[in-house]
Amino acid sequence: MSTPSSIAVRIGPVEFKNPVFIASGICGYAEEYSPVVNLSRLGGVVTKTITMQPRKGNLPPRIHELPHGMLNSIGLENVGLDRYVNEKLPQLNARPDVAVMVSVAAETEDEFIRLAEAFAARDGYAGLELNLSCPNVKGEALDQGRNPALVERISRIVKDRIPNKSLWIKVTPNITDVASVARAAEQGGADAIAAINTVIGIDFDLETGKTVFARGSAGYSGPAILPIALQKVWECAKAVTIPIVGIGGITSVDDVRKFFLAGATAVQVGTQLYADPGLPERIIDALAQNPQWVTQRALPQPVRTP
Amino acid sequence: MSAPEAYRFTPAHAHEHVTRVIKNVALSRRYYLLRLARPDGFIEPVAGQFVHVAVPDAGGDARFFLRRPFSIHDCTAEFLDLVIVEVGPGSQALRRARAGDAVRFYGPLGHAYPVLPEKRVLAVGGGVGLAPLYYYGFRAPATLGKGYRLLYGARSKEDLFLDHVPLEAGGVLLATDDGSHGFRGNVVQLAARELAREPADAIFSCGPTVMMKAAQRLADEHGIPHYASLENRMGCALGACRACVVPTTLEGPSPYRTVCHDGPVFDGAVLQWDELPVP
């Protein structure tokens, strides 16, 4: 009999039962996946990104499979803040055994204030993951994640309003210096860096001579991005002392061990869940049997400098 | 005419199943029939529902993250039949599956055709779109010849797999584009002729988008409902990832609805036919 508590992880003010999560955008608002994943066994689920207003999403097609990964161009289709907090959050309240991190995105600092206040007034979730890095929408979302000063301000805006919840900042790999963004998030009071979002990619249809997606560029995920994600986690780990949640290309327990070696405190499984919904629970079983893996690092933990 | 209450998918049915291949045989140049042992706990499917199949590891570099949705062609206490057309690496890899190989899938999934045993239904199938219409007519509710007429079209005789599936013997009317077997012309032209001969209360369709779009026009001309089963690339098949959407005229935060969860069978009147993916 394993002792699940031995792999519990604390991220900010919240303790999660283990370090294995499902990434945002993969499993909707979580309940959809309950027939094939035992959600209560997970460290948690990061739900699909919510925005102030409902978004209808991008023109289909929206996914494109490639030999070593997958491009997506969903476009943050979601029900909007009001319906989320009135319809979806109450469902989560009824499942206290499932830890939910709610992914949110906003276009302006003012919208972040309103989002944070809406969540501050409610319960039923463990924290917020700010999606400052979606490649599939017009406007500022991706640019936010490239602007350290803005990342710091947004982190502070949100953290000040939800001090008892966990605040994760999801960073983009589509940037030269991810460390500066991670440091800015830490300065702003974030409890963790979630790294990485999808890698921008594009593909063409040789029959039509056009891009596969109406918007052209899309987000690349799957096993191909594992080394990129490990690199970004490694860079963040050298830059900050807050926990890092590693995301990108996990298809096995070994991949998860590499994220811990790179400096991650927790991980999120994404694209592979479509092929293998049993993967998160197998990872949890393996970590419970080998809890030393969770704290194994290739580098010593960095020391915070004043 | 209002649509009858249709069977609705509930997520509890979406179990992950592991089963074995019973046989995997060629039906024609591009089509094959994959017969799987019916796993314990696989609930009785309704025509139009599908299973989401993980492509077995093909070895080497071939890896598939996405499962493939296949409409249920037949289902008994012993087996589950899928008719598959080779369109890409995934369906090619599945074609290599041999008797005894393990296969994983979810299902049955999706919103099915309404079951209308008391109504006159004209079903129009093309290509791999035969599966749900065959299942409805021959197995559940098995009303072929009792108010359910099934018309099936293909490019040519070689694509009709007459040696393997008892279409003609069962009363299915066939059409080929080149006239090599049955009615010469497309299957919707045949449907128009059949409707002129005897009216129907509803049209079911499954096949290429252009065919289903023509079936919608035919239904509109006759003032009868049309239920179309759509196909799309899917991610999760559970209504979560929003990848397999199609545009509709329905209200809501988004005009898009998922083929996996809101469909695959839609009331054709709500679809934005000009915006659907082709084929």
Image (tube, coloured by chain):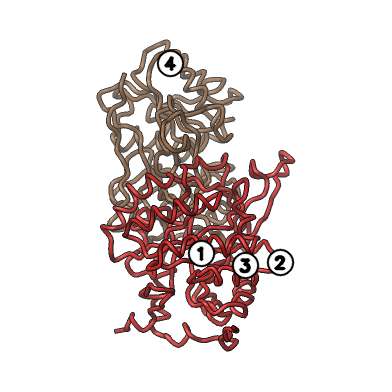
Chain colours: A red, B brown
Does residue B264 appear left or right of residue A69 in this picture?
A: left
Quick one: SS at disc 3? helix
Q: Amino acid at mark 3?
A: Val
Q: Chain of mark 3?
A: A
Query: Which of the two marks, 4 or 1, is nearer to us in this view?
Result: 1
Which circle marks residue B194 in the picture?
4
Which circle, 2 or 3, is nearer the viewer? 3
Q: Which residue is mark 2?
A: A176
Label 4 vs label 3, nearer the camera: 3
Please state the chain letter of the residue tagged with numbered disc 2 in the rendered image: A
Toward the viewer: B123 or B159?
A: B123
Question: Where is mark 1, residue-wise?
Answer: A156
Q: Which residue has dot 3 on it?
A: A181
Which amino acid type is marked by label 4? Answer: Glu
Q: Amino acid at mark 2?
A: Thr
To which quarter of the image does residue A179 belong?
A: bottom right
> Residue drawn 63% across and 71% down?
A232
Secondary structure state at the residue bearing disc 2: loop
Mark 1 / mark 3, whichever is N-terminal:
1
- Residue lying at 63% horizontally and 65% vertically, measured from the top left: A224
Of the two numbered discs 4 and 2 in the rendering, the one whose residue sits closer to the viewer: 2
Closer to the eye: label 1 or 3: 1
Quarter of the picture containing the C terminus of chain A is: bottom right
Whole-angstrom CA distance, mark 4 to mark 2, is 65 Å
Secondary structure beneath dot 1 equals helix
* Residue nearest the viewer, comparing A9 with B193: A9
